[in-house]
Image (cartoon, grey):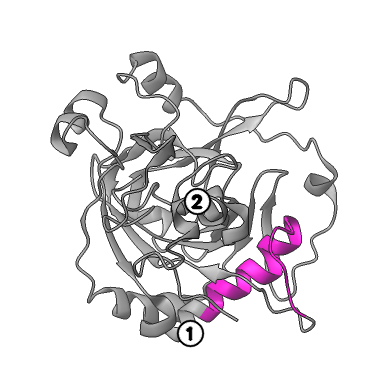
Amino acid sequence: SITGHPCSCCWSARTCAMTVTGGTVVPRRRLRTKVRLDPSLAAAFAAPSVPSASSSARGSAPCAWDGFVCKERNAEYCVVKEAFTPQMLENLGRFLSRKRPKPAKMKNEGAGDSDDERKARYDDRDSMVSWFDAEAECRWLHNRLEEVIQKVGNVEWPLLKADGTGKLECEFEQTQYSVYGPNQHFQAWHQDAFADGNDPEDARQLTIVAMLSKKSVYTGGLFQAKLKDPVTKKKKILKSIRLDAGDVLVFPAKELLHRVGRVKTGTRKTLVFWAFDRASCKYHTVGAGAEVEASAGILGAAKP
């Protein structure tokens, strides 16, 4: 997670979330465990992908996505084929050319290593990011991302309430523009939110990762996930999810453990977008956020 944004697919440096226990502030990290990079993990990371298991009815049932085409479907994620047309990608490229991504940082609350020390020690993340309010700056983009959330994400995983017209009653975080150049990565295993978490970003319910780069312009940089074994139900099946320009990956923010492999050549560009529900997060219901409902411009403006 970057400072303020927990993952590549993250929170802003303007938010410093802490867990408060008995009046004492307890620093915590977004990653479950901090360990030195194990060579065996690097080997596993480069291993061929394992076919996903169609362990649930969702994996084999027909898609019911109004206006969108299913490329891949699993109990824990799905891929929309060419949710962004070539013309949309061209328009988006012109808009994003004005952005100036900066080095991403892992969220490191309280005392601990500096970001430079952490990178040298753990080698967990190295990428460039830029945050922007798509609803205010590029309305058609926001509408398209919201449409994917409504017609795909909330159909597959109905985590968000909707009004009588079908419009979602939720909020949207700022959009993250992520750029990975040669040798850059986010190879620390992480997830975007936690059901038992006490940080602002734990309100995230659905995540979208939109691929902007053609597969032919970069090598490496695979999005990888740990999927539940169909027999043991534990997350131990490594799956590489391949996306082409315009494809969109959708998954429940509190469920999928994932990472991005090291880019070997070229440049990999994505957009990451989150729909969130404050009622799903302790921070906003019984924690610090319950007293300060607005999160200093990091979360989208509350909708009626």
Which residue sits furthest front? 23
Most common SS among magenta residues: helix
Residue at image point 19% right, 67% down: 100
Q: Residues within 10 Å of mark 2 (few under 14, many from 20)?
A: many
Residue at 25 percent across and 45 percent down: it is 105
Q: Nearer the viewer, residue 29 or 263?
A: 29
Quadrant housing residue 81? bottom right
Q: Amino acid at mark 1?
A: Trp
Mark 1, secondary structure of its residue: helix
Callout 2: SS: helix
- N-terminal of the pair, mark 2 or mark 1, is 1
Q: Which residues are magenta?
A: 143-163
Q: CA distance from mark 2 to mark 1?
A: 31 Å
Q: Quadrant of residue 51?
A: top right
Measured from the top left, where is residue 66 in percent x and y?
75, 74
**Residue position marked by numbered label 2 in the rendering:** 283
Viewer-side residue, 39 vs 288? 288
Look at 42% across and 39% down and name the residue there.
19
Crowd band around label 1 with a 10 angstrom C-alpha radius: few (<14), some (14–19), many (20+): some
Place of residue 126 in the rendered image (x, y in percent of width and height, measured from the top left): 25, 42
Quarter of the figure that contains the C terminus: bottom right
* Horizontal side of residue 289 vs 265, given as left or right: right
Q: Amino acid at mark 2?
A: Tyr
| Closer to the camera in the image, 33 or 185 | 33
Relative height, residue 167 to residue 254 (above, below): below
Kindly identify which numbered label has been placed on residue 63.
Answer: none
